[in-house]
Amino acid sequence: MKTLRSPLGRVLGYGAAKEGTVSHWWLQRLTSAALVPLTVWFVYCLLTLPALDYATVVAWLSSTWSALLLILLVLTATRHSQLGVQVVIEDYITSHGLKTITLVLITFAHVVVAAAATFAILKVAFGGVR
């Protein structure tokens, strides 16, 4: 099989930038692996609740473990989403300036979503919403 990579580059797994995409690739796989049990837990919890009314969900979310695991789910999902969108932007936007601005805006949007969701979960968990 013919490749354009140098023998040393193939051995080290690095490209011309001496950095490679190995860490990005692994982080994407790690977040997707973490999302599987967290999503299964979340769906199971929702299906086993006696009702899906506001009071029942607030009572469930007031539990320490429920709040903690839901925050982990939200943070992991937003990071996984940010990594995936980053790959799409890097692959399909050719203008360097537009690519940089878009990556900054997408990262900022993901941070805002993660922070807002975490704040909402903590507010419900600590009894700020009744």
Image (cartoon, grey):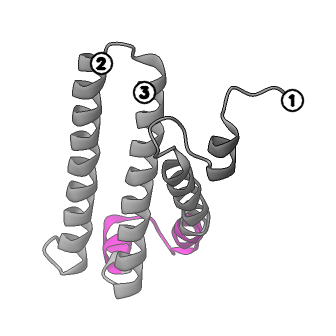
Residue under pointer 1: 1
Q: Earlier in the sequence, mark 3 or mark 2?
A: 3
Going by the numbered disc 1, the residue's amino acid type is Met
The quarter holding residue 9 reads top right
Q: What residue appears at the point 52 percent right and 59 percent down from the top-left corner? A: 31
Going by the numbered disc 3, the residue's amino acid type is Glu
Residues under numbered marks 2 and 1 in contact, where contact means CB atoms less than 8 Å apart: no
Magenta stretch contains residue 51 = yes
- Mark sitting on residue 14: none
Q: Secondary structure at mark 1?
A: loop
Q: Secondary structure at mark 2?
A: helix
Residue under pointer 3: 90
Range covered by the magenta-colored residues: 41-59
Q: Secondary structure at mark 3?
A: helix
Viewer-proximal residue among 8 and 72? 8
Q: Is residue 7 left or right of residue 95?
A: right
Judged from this view, the residue extending furthest toward the bottom is: 64
10 Å crowding of disc 1: few (<14), some (14-19), many (20+): few
Total number of numbered discs in the rendering: 3
Residue under pointer 2: 96
Magenta stretch contains residue 5 = no
10 Å crowding of disc 3: few (<14), some (14-19), many (20+): some
Q: Earlier in the sequence, mark 2 or mark 1?
A: 1
10 Å crowding of disc 2: few (<14), some (14-19), many (20+): few
